[in-house]
Amino acid sequence: MTHQLPQKDEAVVKIDHPDEIAFDVNSLPGGLKGALEAILITCTDPQSVKKLAYLLSVSEKEVQETLEKLKIEYLEQQRGFILSEVGGMWRFYSAPEYGEIISQYIVGNSESKLSIAALETLAIIAYRQPISRSEVASVRGVNVDGVSRTLLQRGLIAEAKEKTDNGAVNYVTTPLFLEKLGISSLEQLEPLAPFLPSDISDIPEFEDIRKPVRKSAEDEELAELESDIQE
């Protein structure tokens, strides 16, 4: 079987891998806009411009410009959703104006809320990262094993590659943490750090990290319940 070469006026898409399918995104009904909408509404995770450009065989500049146009269009149309870039990644979000409706809809969802203990722990890690579990416990004055596991399971914190001098694991926040807050970097966090201790070593409990940390019955119950929560 012989194959005809494409005419000069036909669009030719370069294929880097033999198993890829050549297509012209502009030949689709909605063009590049429609293709981007189809991908983003299907994906549960935010997508980078680089990946979208690769998937659609177009330039990153085209993707970036099209996403910016779509973002403005949705805002002008007052849709129930917005297209937003967070931490260099794009995805659809429900419009802030509909927050109360969404909150009512997801009542009972295990991921809808974190306990006060978990929020306190997350705040300490966010502002003092990288920070070890024993240091977090020293700041809070209670054991944080259970809430740390919960935050790890939900992907809000992660173990840092670098360990402390004594080999302890340090915790840092993740891109998901930024995404949930709707910010692009930790520099955009509210200025609450001045209210935290300027030097953790000044905290009495931290002088000897082997000293038993106070653990109330309430915290024990919270830790046990939260450790069973799955993402």
Image (spheres, grey):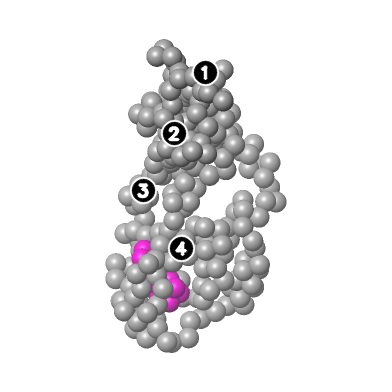
For the residue pair 7 and 105, the one nearer the viewer reads as 7
- 1 or 3: mark nearer the eye: 1
Label 1 vs 4, first from the N-terminus: 1
Q: Is residue 63 visible?
A: no
Residue ID for mark 4: 158
Residue type marked 3: Ser
Residue 27 badge: 1
Helix, strand or loop for the magenta stretch, by majority:
helix
Label 3 vs 4, first from the N-terminus: 4
Q: Which residue is painted at 58% across and 34% down in the image? A: 41
Label 2 vs 4, first from the N-terminus: 2
The span shown in magenta is 129-138
Residue ID for mark 3: 185
Residue ID for mark 2: 15
Give the quadrant of the C terminus.
Answer: bottom right
Q: Is residue 5 visible?
A: yes
Q: Which residue is painted at 55% across and 79% down in the image? A: 215
Number of labels in the image equals 4
What is the spatial separation of the Cα atoms under label 1 and label 3, in whole angstroms? 38 Å
Residue type marked 4: Ala
- 3 or 4: mark nearer the eye: 4
Q: Give the image location of residue 100, x and y in percent.
A: 61, 38
- 1 or 2: mark nearer the eye: 2
- 1 or 4: mark nearer the eye: 1
What is the spatial separation of the Cα atoms under label 2 and label 4, in whole angstroms? 37 Å
